[in-house]
Amino acid sequence: MQRILSTQLRAHVGETVRVAGWVHRRRLLKSVAFLIVRDAAGLAQVVVTDPAARAALEQLTEETVVEVTATVVANDTAPAGVELTDPAVRPLGPPAVPPPFDLYRPTLTATLPTQLDNAPTALRHPSRSAALRISAASVAGFRAALDARDFVEIHTPKVVGSSTESGANVFALDWFGRPAYLAQSPQFYKQLMVGVFERVYEVGPVFRAEPHDTVRHLAQYTSLDVELGFVADHRDVMVVLRDTLAGMLGAVTDRAGAALATLGLEAPEVPAEIPAVHFTEALKIAGAPADEPDLAPAHERALGEWAMAEHGSDFLFVTGYPMAKRPFYTHPDPARPAYSNGFDLLFRGLELVTGGQRLHRYDDYLAALAARGEPVEPYVGYVDAFRHGMPPHGGFAIGLERFVARLTGAANVREVTAFPRDLHRLTP
């Protein structure tokens, strides 16, 4: 008899079926006992009336893995509208040691550090696993949206020979006796691959050795990177980003609707045209000094509130960041060279995406590095490609965990990360 999932039981009313999963909860009443079995799809209620079966059930602990063969009976008050009767319950392993929290409760009452210390079991809670399902659906939507626009998925090295993109904020390692570093982003490689495929994307880990211990930072996170060639300027990139976000949120609704329901959420709408303000205007809206070189978290929150009040939008583009705060490969605004053809996308008042147009001429790279007092040598393998013809191009990167945290309303990005790595955590 083939095993079926809890969500398939309604199609088998009156039949004998086999389900398997974890003991989610036992309710031992005077005349009847209930066994709630949890599988990857949801919950199934098993009704136990036989004295011998009840005695066996009393020996099972929460999280013990079991197999149940029983008859499916309709019952609108049971999970999924059905329950299993006349069961034969067979443990598939020894009695489990219960975790230090109750997984059957609606919310996990353990502190976040306790949950993270016990992640292999804490992630079984529906609220935690729901966030991971939303994450998976988001990536599926990201890929589908870009595949439909003729982008090519690439895979770039995560170990590099030069710490070029943010100075000291890299993790050093020994590579067969030579110094090497964990890659901070695929930025350089995805630009080079525009010269091969014109339109590329990557889903992969990035590493930032930044000593941030905040609710929005991780030392390792998943970056959704995009780069496209033959753009007029950064606005072409913004159009692709808008469509990509719409595809991601559409996939979350289609593929992770049950996870959204578990968390009591609906995916937000992406406007046909996301509102945009220039950095100088953003400072005024946020009440920041006119000479402020960047947006602080409080400024981002104020802008998020403004976008919702003025445009009914959870999203807001801030364009034209000062060149002094953008990487050297950023293309300046031809009309206002002190400002960039770059942008950030705010999602509910939090920076989610950084992107823009890149330089594409070799001489411009030499000039940009010289203007910042940086030597060319560490970048030779990168800038040399621009001697061989590169189109005007641009791109962006989305932090997956930050996106899911903002979407689900999680207070800490670690709540939506399976096994976070940060300033203090290397296990489990």
Image (spheres, rainbow, N blue to C red):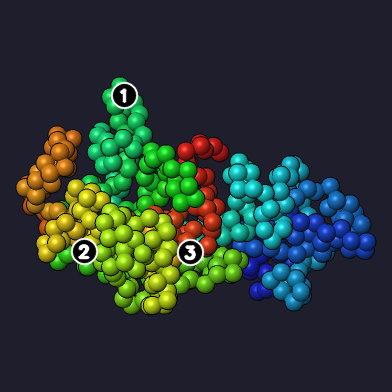
Tell whether label 3 touches label 1 (CB within 8 Å). Answer: no
- Residue at the (34%, 57%) spot, across then down: 295
Disc 1 packing (10 Å; few <14; some 14–19; many ≥20):
few
Disc 2 packing (10 Å; few <14; some 14–19; many ≥20):
many
- Residue at the (31%, 63%) spot, across then down: 283
Q: Hey, which quadrant is residue 353 in on the image?
A: bottom left
**Residue with the mark numbered 2:** 234
- Residue at the (64%, 44%) spot, across then down: 114
Which residue type carries mark 3?
Leu
Q: Which callout, 1 or 2, points at the residue further toward the start of the chain?
A: 1
Tell me the mark number nearer the camera, choosing from 1 and 3. Answer: 3
Q: Hey, which quadrant is residue 156 in on the image?
A: top left
Q: Which mark is residue 290?
A: none
**Residue with the mark numbered 1:** 176
Q: Hey, which quadrant is residue 98 in on the image?
A: top right
Give the Cα distance between marks 1 and 2: 41 Å
**Residue with the mark numbered 3:** 407
> In this view of the protein, which residue sits in the foreground, 82 or 19?
82
Which residue type carries mark 1?
Phe
SS assignment at label 2:
helix
Residue 408 image position (x, y, % from top left): 52, 63
How many circles with numbers are drawn on the protein?
3
Residue 68 image position (x, y, % from top left): 74, 58
SS assignment at label 3:
helix
Q: Which callout, 1 or 3, points at the residue further toward the start of the chain?
A: 1
Which residue type carries mark 2?
His
Tell me the mark number nearer the camera, choosing from 1 and 2. Answer: 2
Q: Is residue 9 visible?
A: yes
> In this view of the protein, which residue sits in the foreground, 291 or 329?
291
SS assignment at label 1:
loop
